[in-house]
Amino acid sequence: DGGITQSPKYLFRKEGQNVTLSCEQNLNHDAMYWYRQDPGQGLRLIYYSQIVNDFQKGDIAEGYSVSREKKESFPLTVTSAQKNPTAFYLCASSRGEGPQHFGDGTRLSIL
Amino acid sequence: RKEVEQDPGPFNVPEGATVAFNCTYSNSASQSFFWYRQDCRKEPKLLMSVYSSGNEDGRFTAQLNRASQYISLLIRDSKLSDSATYLCVVREGNNDMRFGAGTRLTVKP
């Protein structure tokens, strides 16, 4: 079955620690995205990538970093510079002008 | 002004009711439009794309009005399982997708 896999489902971060969220897709989609959703709020774009080895900042990129070394993979690192990291993180992918397809998300909390 | 605006609701309707959601967008150059459904603590899932001529999928009908820059979603014969948050999504070009904050629907017995 084709799809997007995010891991882990739940993640806890200690103060001063960097953590990495995994996102893998086997849909052969060129574009991949990371969003953050806070309770009762809409999705906000963190980073996106339209092609391997290229990515752009979204609306709230500060405190986050990404890489796109392979078409299938778009990991997100939440750095210690992100002072309010507690949120629901969603990865998505798309092809051309088609709709985005989402993974089932990672919930990040601070210890 | 937000790029994509939706009435946050909540909409509380009885089973069998017809309910309509509207969404307005600010960028007249927007290219593609979608409605997603998001259940509590879950990821958004595509409900339907919205085409210029309007389109229907069972009990769901989507309409696009480019002149007025709004999109609508009509749900007929509401079911308990329709309870969710409905997200309006607009692609502005260059793969830039903009999400509304969502409209919450609760269908009651």
Image: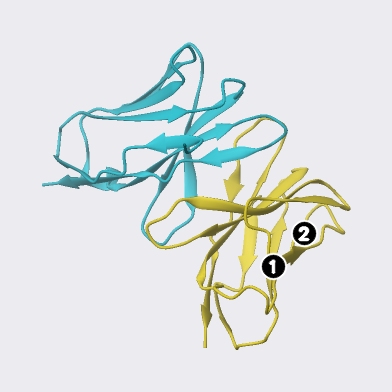
Chain colours: A yellow, B cyan
The residue carrying mark 1 is: A22
Please identify the quarter of the rendering in which residue B13 is found.
Answer: top left
Q: In this view, does B11 lie above or below A14?
A: above
- Tell me the amino acid under the disc marked 1: Ser
Whether tag 2 and tag 1 are in contact, CB under 8 A, the answer is yes
- Does mark 1 fall on the same chain as mark 2? yes
**In the image, farthest residue toward the front:** B1
The local crowd at label 1, few if under 14, some if 14 to 19, many if 20 or more residues have their Cα within 10 Å, is some
Does the rendering let one see residue B58?
no
Q: In this view, does A106 lie above or below B12?
A: below
- Tell me the amino acid under the disc marked 2: Ser
Q: In this view, does B35 lie to the left or right of A33?
A: left
Q: Which residue lies at the image location 46% right of the left edge and 62% below the top edge?
A: A38
The residue carrying mark 2 is: A73
Give coordinates of residue A12: x percent, y percent. 56, 83
Give coordinates of residue B4: x percent, y percent. 47, 35
Host chain of mark 2: A
Q: Is residue A73 above or below residue B81?
A: below
Host chain of mark 1: A
Q: Is residue A28 left or right of residue B83?
A: right
Please identify the quarter of the rendering in which residue B91 is found.
Answer: top right
- Dot 2 or dot 1: first in sequence order is 1
Q: Which of A10 and A62 is in front in this view?
A: A62
- Separation of residues labelled 2 and 1 (CA atoms): 8 Å
Please identify the quarter of the rendering in which residue A84 is found.
Answer: bottom right
Q: In this view, does A44 lie to the left or right of B69?
A: right
Mark 2: secondary structure: loop
Q: Which of A18 and A21 is in front in this view?
A: A18
